[in-house]
Amino acid sequence: MLDIKFIRENPDLVKQSLKNRNLKIDLDALIKLDDYRRKILLELEDLRAKQNKANDEINALLKAKKDTKDKISSMKEISEKTKKLESELKIADSKLGELLLNIPNVPHESVPVGDPTKKKIVRSWGELPKKDFKPATHIELAQRLDIIDFNRAAKITGSNFILYKGWGAKLERALINFMLDFHTQKHGYTEIFPPFLVNRASMTGTGQLPKLEEDMYRLKDDDLFLIPTAEVPVTNIFRDDILDEEKLPIYYTAYTACFRREAGSYGKDTKGLIRVHQFDKVEMVKFVRPEASYDELEKLVADAEDILRALGLPYRVAVLSTQDLSFSASKCYDLEAYASGVDCWLEVSSCSNFESFQARRANIKFRKKDTKKLDFVHTLNGSGVALARTVAAILENYQQKDGSIIIPEALRPYLDGQEKIK
RNA sequence: GGAAGGAUGGCUGAGUGGUUGAAAGCGAUCGCCUCGAAAGCGAUUAGGCCGUAAGGCCUCGCAGGUUCAAAUCCUGCUCCUUCCGCCA
């Protein structure tokens, strides 16, 4: 979340950022509430100071074995006033806290302003595959090769779930291992295997709650949530912690399944692997010094790109515009892999800098080496990369005229040295 | 799921109503000593809010309550440990 002090001191900047995100939030009401809160706080502190003083006096009287009756009875009134103010303050605090939790991060100045069409392609890599036949979609290919069974997944669970089978299941597992090995061996990440269920505090820490509760799978009896991304458990590793500056930057990578209700997105990309309720993803998460976070973001994107290059998937990199930016992010690059069957650029990675937004919510600090003072870390995360769509791109781009799939070389060591799925 | 015990600063741990934001020890940092180090000695060593500052206020797992006054008493909750049960 944003620092209330920052909002108070930069109201116009925050208002402009809300406008750029196309959100209508009454910031003046929030500032007014904060004024009220601070006024009460001042009064209350004054009363408490009186109480503390009186306590010392009563104590001194007791020590001197003198009568304390008058003093105590005169303090009763103040005690009641204090209680009243305390409850008023509590109400104001919780209202303000709620409002603050719903203010999104301020986009970085380099982020294009406007609706999602304003996103900017900053670079691309690879040749679009040219085939002398009409490429099939991953759905057709998967069914023909009997490596994904959409119908039985729907029977077992519901629509938009995936059941991988045979070489499909193996391919999925190979991709996970390949990506984890790549990031740990070549990019210096430490591997994490976190819980797939998290509590409310964790979901609030990374910014999914309170705004996006209806997009999450929730276990009502236990008030736990299925993670929508490994970002949630991995970022929350350091919730309420103070890190040493020497330990920064910290790079973590984790495979997890990701669960998304995708409420309200019916009818959009609902076929095949493009939009599903459960998918696998290898995620990268960074904890860095504030000055370093934008350089780290570039490196993070490069780390994700390396995966797509190693897999030989043509892709492009886009900076998202202010209205496309997620709630907690200040800047985000999307990686889009081209898939020839559906003839679409598929979003397979989102790499974001959250600056101190998540760190403030989750209370993740570090102690500066020189001044010994505390400051919030900056957090970043990026997919490296999301699997279902990547599988679609691999199947479609590597398909042969006979319907078989050439396995990208980088994956062969993970697939018994096999060169083809047929 | 049942029973018992516990949660205090970076760590260990004292503290059962008022001078305790908190003893003591460890660790850490700085200084003295030393050629250098160890040992020893001395000092410093929680975070947040308000304030230019002086200073004030808050915080002893969380939330309520009792009281003039709560780390300390009461209630609820969360988490941890141990034992039993169940279980991959």
Image (tube, rainbow, N blue to C red):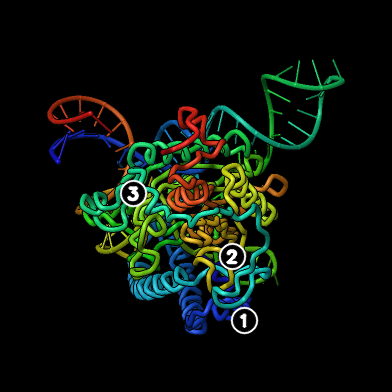
Q: Which residue is mark 1?
A: A12
**Total marks placed:** 3
Tell me the subunit letter for badge 2. A
Q: Which residue is mark 2?
A: A330
The residue located at (36%, 43%) in the rendering is: A145
Label 3 neighbour load within 10 Å: few <14, some 14-19, many 20+: few
Report, in whole angstroms, how far the alpha carbon at label 2 lies from the one at label 3.
41 Å
User: Which one is closest to the eye, mark 2 or mark 3?
Assistant: 3
Horizontal relation, residue A72 to residue A306: left or right: left
The residue located at (23%, 52%) in the rendering is: A157
The residue located at (21%, 54%) in the rendering is: A221
Judge by depth and name the residue closer to the eye, A416 or A114. A416
Give SS at disc 3: helix
Check disc 1 and give the amino acid type: Asp
Give SS at disc 2: loop
Q: Position of residue A370 (x, y in %)?
A: 72, 46
Can I make out residue A331 in this image? yes
Vertical side of A87 occupied by B87: above or below: above
Whether discs 2 and 1 lie on one chain: the answer is yes
